[in-house]
């Protein structure tokens, strides 16, 4: 995305030093970190504490940044390409999933220049439907698993759920952590479950949902982010979209700092996916600015940043046409999901 320098500001740089944590190198062998609950607790609680005031201030400042003309058009197309177009409702039908897949491949049938979305995200029993509908396209199938959204099931059930999703054609698995275990301080249990799901997912990419709204504190979000990455997550994800607090700029900023610092410490890059409540083009651009100014351009790609959303695509298409024609389209310009 162009205009990277223009997106920065004196104030954003000023607040950066308040919340950016220095790369925290793990012990020589990561096995030492996860050898016991006590070792893992020492490591996670040894991470620098989060300056909540500074974090909120930086997120607020970056949320005021605006981009114009060509850069905005590029940002809209980039945001479209990063969407995990999602339907996770009890009333989902094969017809609805096929329709969503068609929209993901060709978001605007009247404009072949509109990029396809990154993935279609569905429940495991719909993964085979999505796989068939997306055959021959570059759009991936993402499936939630592990007793989504609450995660209240025995580990064998969660692993079976994961294997079923992959067997049905899921290219990506979005799992939920056991928040009860995490909040009780049973970090090794959470680590081992993520690692077991990572193994069960095989070649599929693993997105680990932290459910930030239930973790209560920024320090917990930082610890959960590092825990998931240590256990093998390919992405860390803010939320299920099923609780009252989902993706926010501050908690996404914190997770972007975590993946940036994790790569500096370990050499391994991990992606970030905010999900839930991202509905407008203005929202999406705020998140792209956040990525650009926090993790950097290396993360400005669908390979490393996703937007979990259902209604966002329609607004991006409307804004895209406004830039192209100078006028807003009527309500029938986009399909109703």
Image (spheres, rainbow, N blue to C red):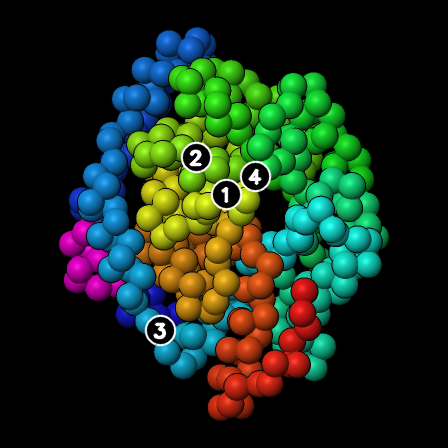
Quarter occupied by the C terminus: bottom right
Which sits earlier in the primary sequence, circle 1 or circle 3?
Answer: 3
Q: Position of residue 265 (x, y in %)?
A: 35, 32
Label 2: element kind: helix
Disc 1 to disc 2: CB gap under 8 Å: yes
Image height of 23 relative to 58, above or below: above
Frontmost residue, 117 versus 216? 216
Q: Is residue 100 left or right of residue 217?
A: right
Frontmost residue, 2 versus 255? 255
Within-10-Å neighbours for mark 2: few <14, some 14–19, many 20+: some
Q: Is residue 193 left or right of residue 33?
A: right
Which sits earlier in the primary sequence, circle 4 or circle 1?
Answer: 4
Q: Residue furthest bottom?
A: 326
Q: Is residue 334 visible?
A: yes
Q: Which residues are magenta?
A: 8-15
Residue under the image location 74 percent in, 36 percent down:
166
Q: Estimate the spatial distance between the alpha carbons at disc 1 and disc 3, rounded to whole Å.
A: 31 Å
Closer to viewer: mark 3 or mark 2: 2
Name the residue beneath numbered marker 4: 207
Q: Main secondary structure of the magenta part?
A: helix
Q: Which mark is residue 335?
A: none
Q: Position of residue 136 (x, y in %)?
A: 80, 58
């Amino acid at each position: 995305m162009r205009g990277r320098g223009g997106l920065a500001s004196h104030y954003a740089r000023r607040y950066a030093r308040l919340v950016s944590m220095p790369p925290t190198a793990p012990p020589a062998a990561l096995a030492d970190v996860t050898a016991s609950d006590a070792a893992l607790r020492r490591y996670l609680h040894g991470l620098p504490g989060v300056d909540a005031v500074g974090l909120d201030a930086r997120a607020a400042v970056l949320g005021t940044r605006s981009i114009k003309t060509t850069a905005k058009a590029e940002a809209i197309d980039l945001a479209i390409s990063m969407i995990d177009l999602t339907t996770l409702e009890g009333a989902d039908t094969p017809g609805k999933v096929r329709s969503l897949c068609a929209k993901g491949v060709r978001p605007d049938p009247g404009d072949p220049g509109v990029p396809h979305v990154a993935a279609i995200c569905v429940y495991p029993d719909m993964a085979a439907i999505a796989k068939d509908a997306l055959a021959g396209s570059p759009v991936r199938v993402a499936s939630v698993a592990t007793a989504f959204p609450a995660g209240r099931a025995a580990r064998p059930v969660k692993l079976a759920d994961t294997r079923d999703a992959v067997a049905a054609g899921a290219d990506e698995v979005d799992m939920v952590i056991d928040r009860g275990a995490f909040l009780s301080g049973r970090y090794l249990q959470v680590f081992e479950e993520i690692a077991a799901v990572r193994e069960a997912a095989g070649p599929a990419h693993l997105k680990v949902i932290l459910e930030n709204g239930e973790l209560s504190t920024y320090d917990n979000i930082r610890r959960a982010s590092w825990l998931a990455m240590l256990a093998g997550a390919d992405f860390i994800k803010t939320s299920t979209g099923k609780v009252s607090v989902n993706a926010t700029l501050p908690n996404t900023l914190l997770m972007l700092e975590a993946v940036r610092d994790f790569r500096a410490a370990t050499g391994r890059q991990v992606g970030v996916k905010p999900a839930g409540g991202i509905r407008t083009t203005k929202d999406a651009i705020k998140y792209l600015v956040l990525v650009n100014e926090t993790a950097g351009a290396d993360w400005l790609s669908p390979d490393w940043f996703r937007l979990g959303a259902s209604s966002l695509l329609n607004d991006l298409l409307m804004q895209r046409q406004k830039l192209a024609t100078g006028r807003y389209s009527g309500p029938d310009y986009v399909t109703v999901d």
